[in-house]
Amino acid sequence: LLLERFGSLYPLQDYLWMLVVIAFCWWLLLSSHQRCYRYGARDLPENVKGIFSVVLKGSALLLAVLFFTQTLDQSRLLLALFVLFNLGLLLGARIILWRMLRLYRLAGKSVRDILLVGSGEIAVKFLQMLEEHSEWKMRVTDIMDWDEARIGTKVRGYTVSKPLSQLLHVLENNRINQVVFAINHSLLNKITESLRICESMGVQSSLLLDIFPDRTIAKMRFGNLGGMPCLTYSTVPGLSWEMGFKYAMDRIGAFALLVLFAPLMITTALLIKLTSRGPVFFTQSRCGLNGKFFNFYKFRSMHPGADKLQKTLLDKNEMTGPVFKIKDDPRVTPIGKVIRKLSIDELPQLFNVLKGDMSLVGPRPPLPEELAQYETWQRRRLSMKPGITCFWQTSGRSLVSFDEWMKSDLEYIDRWSLWLDIKLLFKTIPAVLMGRGAT
């Protein structure tokens, strides 16, 4: 009955390309949903929510691929069974693994015994975190301090029992998995010998430092520079497989879109040339990554000399901040109104993406004179490569105030993920088709 209702299945080889797409999409989604990998005592509901989210988004991505590749004639029975079996298998595997880990923890086999060194504010914060995250399965067995005057004091119910000078004796006579040094950065010279003792005993040691305790935005990465340990603070994502894939997606996506829109771009170029004097393309100097200048391309939508006429229209500016935008701009040509409404004038920026000056998704590149008027906090939007679309393009463009625009770009930088880029690309399509906020 099911086969009669949904149609017969095609040979397996007809689905091989789909398996590649599915494997990649599911790997991408699972790796970006961190809550799918939490196995604490209270994390099963989060696991279930994460799996449902992955399957729902993955199914939507698969349907989008089938739509754009014009292969929606695939067996609906197979697609329905795939979604159901995929959901069941992922949920079943997660529940079984969660249950096994829970039994393992209840048996006390996964608990890590921690020796805490320090009794100050950092140590208090660390102990508080352990109380809030029982799923970490870390048990503080003792607290030591380099200041012998602190012996006997209480820290969140624990007693500082020994001076740091007895570290070797404690490690030799107790089962310690890890030594955590919760110290002020000014005391690093006091633990050098203690770190050597941990190394010689083969015991893992960790440093909790308050180098910049007020840091709220920058992400910290640990690495080495010429063999020297190095802490890097950055407000933008570091090098990762996701950033590498973003780079590849930009190049491949820009090339594919140029091929797809080639007939439309050729037609637009002819209409511009036939209906007004001047060049087809408008080239302008813009500020890219870290303020580097590059040539920015658009289809010309205004009469020649429009930049000079802008000075006579400044009193009609409808945007706050250094950006100039007005409705019914008299400088715009008849064809320009159409291509601006549908964002067709932005298509040549795909060449900017191919050249590496821009990305498909990212903050819009400002003019040098606009950048000169930025406040300090607004300049951070230049820390990521500019793009063709971002939150601003999908939320109304000209309907959004300048400050809201800047804040949305910083939100994009702080929240960036590959999945966010994909979502913004899909949200751009209806925003462009409806001409939302375009002028």
Image (cartoon, helix red, strand yellow):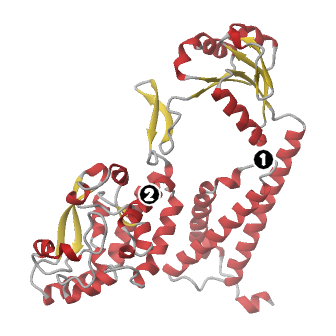
Camera-nearest residue between 27 and 364: 364
Occupied quadrant, residue 368: bottom left
137 up-or-down from 192: above or below: below
Quarter containing the N terminus: bottom right
Q: Amino acid at mark 2?
A: Lys
Residue 412 percent location from the top left of the image: 46, 59
Which residue is found at the position 78% from the left and 56% from the top?
Answer: 94
Total of numbered circles in the picture? 2
* Residue ID for mark 1: 40
Q: Is residue 380 left or right of residue 26?
A: left
* Residue ID for mark 2: 246
Residue 72 percent location from the top left of the image: 57, 84
For marks 1 and 2 on the same chain, the one whose residue lies earlier in the sequence = 1
Quarter containing the C terminus: bottom left
Residue 418 percent location from the top left of the image: 50, 59
Q: Is residue 369 visible?
A: yes
Camera-nearest residue between 361 and 262: 361
Q: Is residue 13 visible?
A: no
261 up-or-down from 157: above or below: below
